[in-house]
Amino acid sequence: MAGSQGKLLHLPALEITQGPSRRLYTFAVDGKQVPSFAAVSRVRRDSEQQLHGYQRPEVLAHVAAIRRYVESDDNPLLPNAIVVAFDDRVRFVPADAGTDAPSYVRLGTLVVPVSDDWEDADKPGFIVDGQQRCAAIRNADVAAFPICVTAFITADQADHRSQFILVNSTKPLPKGLIHELLPAASGPLPNQLRVRQLPATVLERLNFDQRSPLRHMIQTPTNPTGVIKDNSMLRMLENSISDGLLYRFRGNEDSLPNIGFMVTVLSDFWTAVREVFGEDAWGKPPRKSRLMHGAGIISMGYLMDAIADTSGSDDDVPDVHGFAAGLKTVKDYCRWTEGTWDLGDGVPRRWNDVQNTPRDIQRVTDFLVTRYYAGQGKRHDRSSRLF
């Protein structure tokens, strides 16, 4: 049995080597004891808009269902281990050698400090996976309920976030939470997440930098009142990073992305959008302004690329005035908050009939970019780039 010695828990454990510097620890503990050494790291932002934590709120219905099962079943079984990230105050003491265990396994004791006086932030462990099970066992009307724990030791919060993303990437974890955690994650990630890390980092800067015109306007788990859906902004950024204006600053094998310059260019563009289209269309919910709607955000991203395309060389990037001059050439054709779009396909569309679908986004994009190029005396190749 795990015993307590002063302010330490001594937990019999297996140490498993999985890589040159990766050690996993597997042990059993009474689930009632987990809150004494491990807390849930809630995702939030401080007054400086820095991201802390990574866990979503408890799903109360899920917690209640597990609790009922633990309390009422004659022979309850929760076979899945919870995952805990420990800081370096936790240490592993190997047992005496001489067992026949494989070379990648060591028997020993995990020594974990505990204190009744600690706040959650002071505890040495954070729950990476299994918070609903832990909450259910904590609240259950049972004397004890042993569970399995898999743990790793690292003082790096970015490592905590990466493991949380990896553990939950195949589960129905809200995409918005994954996107908000990606900028502060480290280590290897699945390819579909790795390619979103750069646009997610740019989005975070746009949403929380003091000088950004989009500050607090993008809806994320820590900014739920934003009027622009994070996925719409991510798609706009991905399009431009893949084959547009932002591609120039994405870096290569020999250089890192110039995120600061990306944010500056985007801030200039969206400042120009705010100035040209005014308060009637800016900052309103999508149901009141299609400029803030997915169709508006994504099509304006393509228009940004088109304006930059006509600005000269790759080193010549428009400033606020340059973007505003380009936007004014299409302003009178836009119907963001009232009126009817004449998209050139013979089908008039009320302003709020435009939907966030690939077909409607392409129609609005083709219309705006074609109008812009026509104003520059150029022809828009509709087969290029879109979708």
Image: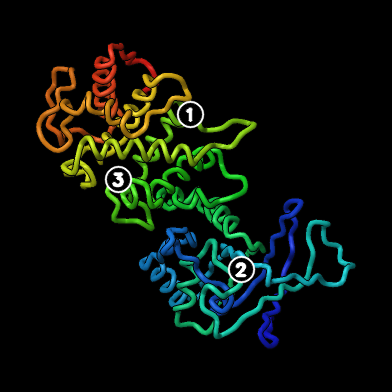
Residue toward you, 52 or 54: 52
Examine the rendering and report whether any part of residue 375 can be seen: yes
**Image quarter of residue 262:** top left
Label disc, if present, on residue 84 of the rendered structure = none
Q: Residues within 10 Å of mark 3 (few under 14, many from 20)?
A: many
Q: Looking at this rendering, what residue extends furthest in the front direction?
A: 321
Residue type at mark 2 is Cys
Tell me if I can see residue 359 in this picture.
no
Residue at 56 percent across and 52 percent down: it is 162
Distance in Å between CA atoms under marks 3 and 2: 42 Å
* Residue beneath disc 1: 247
Three-letter amino acid code of the residue under disc 1: Tyr
Query: Element at badge 1?
Result: helix
Q: Position of residue 212 (x, y in %)?
A: 36, 46
Q: Where is 291 relative to 341, above or below?
A: below
- Few, some or many residues within 10 Å of mark 1 (<14, 14–19, 20+): some
Q: Amino acid at mark 3?
A: Ile
> Percent from the top left, x then y, of residue 175?
41, 48
Badge 3 or badge 2: first in the primary sequence: 2
Query: Is residue 95 placed above or below 232 in the rendered structure?
Result: below
Disc 2: CA contacts within 10 A as few (<14), some (14-19) or many (>=20): some
In-front residue for pair 279/85: 279
In the drawing, what numbered circle is on residue 148? Answer: 2
CB within 8 Å, label 3 to label 2: no
Q: Quadrant of residue 309?
A: top left
Where disc 2 sits, the SS reads strand
Which quarter of the rendered picture does the N terminus lie within? bottom right
Residue located at (51% from left, 75% from top): 120
State which mark lies toward you, 1 or 2: 1
Return the residue at label 3: 228
